Image (tube, helix red, strand yellow):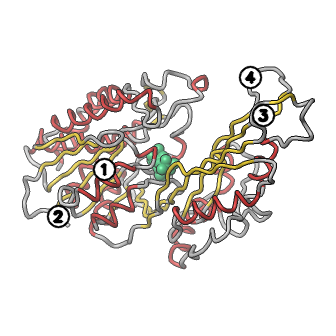
Amino acid sequence: MDSVISHLKSNFNTYLEELKEYLRIKSISTLDANRSDMIKCADFVADKLRHAGMSRVEIFQTARHPIVYGEWLGQPGKPTVLIYGHYDVQPVDPLDLWHSDPFEPVIHDEKIWARGANDNKGQNYVHIKSVDAYFKTLGTLPLNVKFLFEGEEEIGSESLTSFLKTHQELLKCDSVLVSDTSMYGRGIPTITYGLRGLLYMEVEMTGPDKDLHSGSFGGAVANPINELAKLISKLHDKNGKITVPNFYNGVQKLSKAEKENFKRLKFSENAYAKEVGVKKLHGEKGFTTLEKLWTRPTLDCNGIIGGFTEIGAKTVLPSKAKAKISMRLVPNQDPLKIAKDFAKYVKSLVPQSVKLDVKMLHYGYPAVVPFGSKALNAGAKATAKAYGKKTVFTREGGSISIVVDFIKNLKAPVVLMGFGLDSDDIHSPNEHFLLENFEKGLYASAYFLDEFSKA
Ligand code: BES
Ligand code: MN
């Protein structure tokens, strides 16, 4: 074990150079223009898995982006861990807010800066290299390993969801290891046990069938931007509750044990407000910030499109306005059911002077992983060893759609062992990853394989 860790230590700079290469690939899953980059990135991952000693590596084509699978099953009788990661990244706009090219990684201030540096290339690469280090030093692994990397996490994991159903035997394992979450704070080893789900909708409002002069027609013809704004404003009540019928059905109260656990985390509302740069925090009445972020469902408008948006003035009554609206969901909420209720409700809110089209873009179920599994304990031990501190357990506000399918289809405990920080600006301009976490992540991964092999 010591030799593995010291190998990881002495090869750190090489790993960093390889990570840079990974980060240069513009694997933006949502944009059709980047299709070939997705293929290139899948090839890159497959190549690194082969180099890391996987005896079988395969790229599976899907309806959208390829899935990369790798395995080494040379320890029959020992447990099998399935390591999941996603090689796709979010778009980079607004580009002018980046201090350097999002796809030309740079290192400064003890961080690596690029789109995907944290989410998820930096985080998933640690596992490939820890496996590699075992083979280079000990010539073997302490247990069986399967790798599963997808290219659609940022757009809802549709292909992997069906792949899981059709490849249960191939993916059979005793635990799933995922590094795609945040640490509770810098230097605090963290295992996450809950993620919110997601429902992403798009509503398009149409007024007149073409853009009109706002003087000749304004006042007599409905303006879809005005009406859309009214509609959005009706989706929350004055207490911050979401007004969609049946929305809160089944949402559970927080257990006493969880409340206690949250308390122990000593969350500072002031420090948090300062960190995000707001004067005052906001949200549903009657809940603490951690409860709001981790255990309560929310609704947010993610983008709004319509009318004249160039520099200068144009007097126009637009024909159309569009809003992208997403909801974060918690256990017992069913995104497909809520999508129906949402569509019906928003349609009921608009006047006859406009038309409303409602579309679902994607969805994912919420997940809470049970405490007490051998895998979770191994994860907590491994991160504690890597960081030299006791591991804390958190839930998260973000979503990883496939986690629930791992639980349902593979029936294996999922270990969410994150090395990111909430301040790493994932999905934002200037995404970065602390070199310290890249390094400790490598160690934690190696410790996990060791700990779980003995579990
Ligand atoms: N890594 C994130 C999820 C995450 C972020 C979990 C921070 C915990 C803390 C993941 O890549 C992500 O961004 N997921 C999307 C999923 C969606 C597009 C289906 C999300 O949460 O918006
Ligand atoms: Mn992401």
Q: Is the residue marked 2 within 8 Å of ligand 1, measured from its CB?
A: no
The residue carrying pointer 3 sits among few (fewer than 14), some (14 to 19) or many (20 or more) residues within 10 Å by Cα, namely: many
| Callout in the foreground (3, 4) | 3
Q: Tell me the amino acid under the disc marked 1.
A: Tyr
Q: Quadrant of residue 382?
A: bottom left
Q: CA distance from mark 1 to mark 3?
A: 45 Å
Q: Tell me the amino acid under the disc marked 2.
A: Lys
Left or right: where does residue 49 sit relative to residue 24?
left
The dot on residue 454 is: 2
Q: Tell me the amino acid under the disc marked 3.
A: Pro
SS type, badge 1: strand
Q: Specify which label sits upstream in the sequence, 4 or 1.
A: 1
SS type, badge 2: loop
Q: Tell me the amino acid under the disc marked 4.
A: Glu
Q: Which residue, given by chain and number where applicable, does mark 1 sit on?
A: 84
SS type, badge 4: loop
**Which one is in front, 365 or 81?**
365
Q: Is the residue marked 1 within 8 Å of ligand 1, measured from its CB?
A: no
Q: Which residue, given by chain and number where applicable, does mark 4 sit on?
A: 310
Q: Specify which label sits upstream in the sequence, 3 or 4.
A: 4
